[in-house]
Image (cartoon, rainbow, N blue to C red):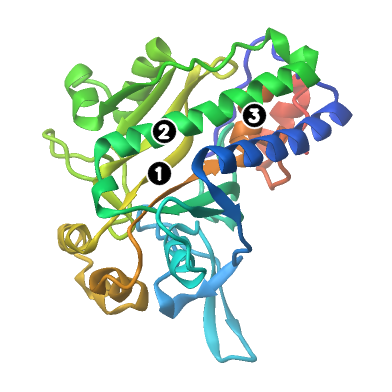
Amino acid sequence: MNHCYIPEGYAPMLNPYETQLAISTTKRLFADSLCAQLNLRRVSAPLFVEASTGLNDDLNGVERPVSFDITATGTDAQVVHSLAKWKRYALAEYCFMPGTGLYTDMNAIRRDEELDNLHSIYVDQWDWEKVITYSDRNVDFLKNTVRKIVGAIITTEKTMRNLFPALMGHPETDPDIVFLTTQELENLYPDLTPKERENAFVREHHTVFLMQIGGTLKSGIRHDGRAPDYDDWTLNGDLLLWNDTLQCAYELSSMGIRVDAEAMERQLTLSGCEARKALPFHQGVLSGELPLSIGGGIGQSRLCMLLLGSAHIGEVQCSIWDRETVDACREAGIPLL
């Protein structure tokens, strides 16, 4: 089911020309700030990968990739869902050292996405990955990395407000980050759904990093799905900010310390995915050939939405929408690109 929410009295803070300029400026400023904070270098990345490599991210395990056959090679390819696995492979291929990493502009098609103000079948994000040591595989290192990313967001936001004074009326990002686990969140709101819990907590605390996503909670359910073969479910999380325009918790980034051999064995077994061990990427992790790493994705359109106070992701990216959404946005004065 598709859903479009129209905020009462909403009007874009920038005109169409200013919006295009602000989108490109936001992306340039944030990429530079992120690189400085995390010691990253930009690399080129694939739009599609061979299905047989196991490099594609299968997200929650049910989304269908866009697939096609390649006449010249006789192989099947998949448009990437994200580059969570490919990036770790690239760290090894490009000889990155501990403390350094890469980022790329990732573009994906998620054909099964339900459409609403925040979700599109087109996904654009900064995918980043960084080599770490075994001693870095801990919660403190994860938290410190989150603080650096939030710092890059705030630096970008301050510059955008100086360049586009019309944005001054939009609430600023709260620099005080609250860290908690999905189990702690369930304990606080046992009678709410996972999404309702996020809304309730982030409404109060504004900038939240919700940790340990993927495993089963005491209630017998998962807070959210996570593929078993890239994030370590004990060392990952989502960066959630309060979206004042839409009055909801807003996931800007999914990230985590990646699985080592032990975590991959455990999570593949829990998920009933042991057969994946034969795939080249998984063999690389299990054998120790691929480096230990931390990484994630940060939504480009979502960051633009947040800093521009946009009500719909279609205001900052081009995609395809159902007729009801197009009509509702046109009637409300929300300009879809």
Q: As rendered, which of 2 and 276 lies closer to the eye?
A: 276
Check disc 1 and report the residue beneath it. 255
Task: Give the residue displayed 64% in from the left and 91% down from the top.
Answer: 72
Residue at (58% x, 46% y) in the render: 125
> How far apart are labels 3 and 2 at the CA level?
20 Å
Q: Quadrant of residue 192?
A: top left
Tell me if mark 2 has few (under 14), some (14-19) or many (20+) residues whose alpha carbon lies within 10 angstroms of its own: many
Mark 3 or 2, nearer chain start: 2
Give the percent coordinates (x, y) of residue 333. 78, 21
Q: Residue furthest right?
A: 17
Point out the frontmost of discs 3 and 1. 1
Q: Specify the label residue 305 is tagged with.
A: 3
| For residue 35, above or below residue 56 | above
| Location of residue 239 by image quarter | top left
Reading the image, the residue beneath label 2 is 146
Residue occupying the point 53% across, 37% down: 37
